[in-house]
């Protein structure tokens, strides 16, 4: 793991984020039946041309916010199983409070029974107060690959899939030194929680696709009203595909909720990435 010193403004923001969000999550955790707009997810299909990976398929999930088991989590498991992925990628905000650790890893273990699971951390994972060392120990125990400013490589056909996971960009914890140099027939996938990762990349960063979340798609989409709920680090990127001159990114609407257990006109999302010739 590439370690970096977290600046004092980011430490302050983590403390404030924890102090503001924890009471909401602890309160609504007592009333799971109050959830609205989270029980029906949407499946989005994405296609990327890369011959060596042709025919391979991956699932992208984000913003789980699993603090207790809900029936909707069973529906997600069923959908993922039916899609028969080769890999599952999860881009942070795994939970909100420490009590969520057991149901979170129960959910991740069920996903791991379907395909290898790769995760990275988001801002709420840091707000929760659960130390990175605990996430690491539990991930190792459950055979989940946690990437915190790290990369791993998977042989695939005649090529190679490089999976890079950075710590949360919205808290300025991402260290891009973990991105490997380009290589022939390598597809480099970058997992990052917040969309502002796109603004941190330079031309020399050989990244073929970025997957992120954080926005919840705005969580509330009211017809005729501009999106007004976006956390810091989105830079106006609400959902779907985005790009700059060199890099492509997909922003997933996620599965969970933030602060209030409601989604309006903004269904949770499972993204399916398929590679083609």
Image (cartoon, grey):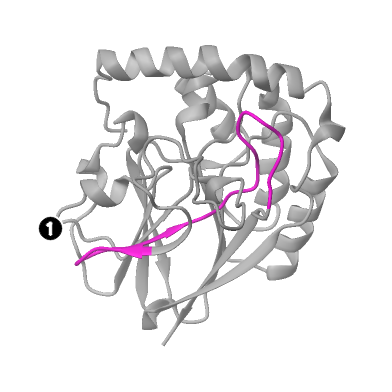
Span of residues in magenta: 242-264
At 24% from the left edge and 20% from the top edge, which residue is drawn?
Answer: 5
Work out whether 28 lies above or below 19.
below
Reply yes or no: does residue 57 show up in magenta: no
Q: Position of residue 201 (x, y in %)?
A: 21, 51
Is residue 48 something that shows in the picture?
yes
Write down the quadrant of residue 183 in the picture.
bottom left
Quadrant where the N terminus is found in the figure: top left
Left or right position of 6 against 53: left
Work out whether 135 lies above or below 235.
above
At 32% from the left edge and 20% from the top edge, which residue is drawn?
Answer: 10
Q: Position of residue 167 (x, y in %)?
A: 37, 35
**Dot 1 surroundings within 10 Å: few (below 14), some, or many (20 or more)?**
few
| Kind of element beneath mark 1 | loop
At 64% from the left edge and 54% from the top edge, which residue is drawn?
Answer: 266
Number of labels in the image equals 1
Foreground residue among 119 and 249: 249
Reply yes or no: does residue 261 show up in magenta: yes
Q: Position of residue 103 (x, y in %)?
A: 74, 31
At 42% from the left edge and 40% from the top edge, which residue is drawn?
Answer: 147
Quadrant where the C terminus is found in the figure: bottom left
Foreground residue among 186 and 255: 255
Mark 1 lies on residue: 204
Foreground residue among 4 and 31: 31
User: What residue occupies the far left of the structure in this picture?
Assistant: 204
């Amino acid at each position: 793991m590439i370690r970096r010193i977290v600046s004092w403004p980011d430490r302050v923001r983590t403390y404030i984020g924890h102090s503001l969000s924890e009471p909401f999550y602890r309160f609504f955790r007592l009333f799971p039946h109050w959830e609205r707009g989270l029980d029906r997810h949407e499946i989005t299909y994405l296609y990327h041309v890369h011959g060596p990976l042709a025919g391979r398929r991956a699932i992208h999930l984000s913003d789980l916010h699993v603090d207790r088991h809900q029936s909707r989590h069973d529906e997600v498991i069923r959908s993922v199983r039916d899609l028969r992925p080769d890999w599952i990628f999860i881009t942070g905000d795994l939970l909100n409070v420490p009590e969520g650790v057991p149901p979170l890893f129960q959910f991740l273990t069920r996903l791991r029974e379907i395909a290898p699971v790769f995760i990275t951390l988001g801002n709420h994972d840091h707000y929760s107060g659960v130390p990175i060392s605990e996430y690491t120990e539990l991930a190792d125990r459950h055979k989940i690959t946690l990437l915190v400013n790290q990369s791993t490589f998977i042989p695939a056909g005649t090529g190679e899939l490089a999976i890079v996971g950075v710590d949360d960009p919205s808290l300025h914890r991402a260290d891009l030194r973990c991105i490997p140099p380009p290589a022939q027939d390598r597809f480099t996938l970058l997992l990052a929680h917040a969309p502002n990762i796109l603004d941190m990349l330079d031309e020399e960063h050989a990244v073929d696709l970025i997957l992120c979340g954080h926005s919840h798609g705005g969580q509330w989409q009211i017809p005729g009203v501009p999106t007004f709920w976006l956390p810091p680090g989105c830079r106006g990127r609400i959902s779907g595909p985005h790009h700059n001159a060199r890099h492509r990114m997909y922003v997933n609407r996620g599965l969970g909720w933030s602060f209030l257990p409601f989604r309006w006109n903004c269904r949770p999302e499972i993204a399916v990435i398929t590679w083609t010739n």
